[in-house]
Image (spheres, grey):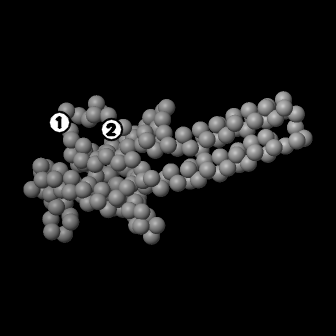
Amino acid sequence: MGYPRDNLAPGEQVVIHRHPHWKSLVAPVLLFWAVTAIAGVALGYIRTSDSLSSGASMWLTIVVIVVWLVASTYWLVRPLLSWRTTHFVVTDRRVMYRNGIVTRSGIGIPMRRITSVEFRHGLIDRVLRTGTLVIESASDEPLSFHDIPDVEAVHAQLYQELLDEDDGDDYGWDDHGRGRRR
């Protein structure tokens, strides 16, 4: 699913579009496997048990299947839908973050309001080529965007977009990284 183009202003071009890194889905998949294994053992016990009547066996089977469906929906389907509906988008004019399945929320930061961009990643994040992107704007607290795939490339591209944005403004950067009037 691509980012909805109708959320863009006329002439606005998408530069980067990312979903969170796949590592955010590891825990839900492992929980799904654990729930499936437990349900399989429970069904095997119910089917091979001589102490249960056929009616009790049928009802216990239905209960195990319903519990498995509910747990699978909560621990696998919900995180998958959340991952799929989370968008980190950089355009030539702004940075946008949208997430939510039923209730959507989002933020947009115009390029001209961004004052600094940094990234953080530990050893495992470096191996997986992911990390946290921190964007500070002129009036707000810094915003952290976690699990951004290829965070260093996103940081570099976002910085390039900021430089391109500055080329069209009355302000620029001097050799020491300070703002100056042109």
Q: Residues within 10 Å of mark 1 (few under 14, many from 20)?
A: few
Check disc 2 and report the residue beneath it. Answer: 3
Residue sitting at x 40%, y 67%: 126
Which residue, given by chain and number where applicable, does mark 1 sit on?
Answer: 11
Residue 58, image x, y percentages:
79, 32
Q: Residue at x 38, y 62 (%)?
A: 129
Measuring 73% from the left and 48% from the top, which residue is drawn there?
A: 41
Could you say whether the residue bearing mark 2 is in a helix, strand or loop? loop
Measured as percent of width and height from the top left, residue 5 is found at 28, 34
Q: Nearer the viewer, mark 1 or mark 2?
A: 2
User: What is the secondary structure assignment of the residue under circle 1?
Assistant: loop
Q: Residues within 10 Å of mark 2 (few under 14, many from 20)?
A: some
Please provide percent x and percent y for residue 99: 43, 40
Q: Which of the pair 71/171 is nearer the observer?
A: 71
Amino acid marked by disc 1: Gly
Q: Is 120 drawn above or below residue 139 in the view shown?
A: below
Q: CA distance from mark 1 to mark 2?
A: 15 Å
- Identify the disc placed on residue 100: none
Q: Nearer the viewer, residue 64 or 130?
A: 64
**Can you say which quadrant of the picture contains the C terminus?**
bottom left
Which badge, 1 or 2, comes first in the chain's sequence? 2
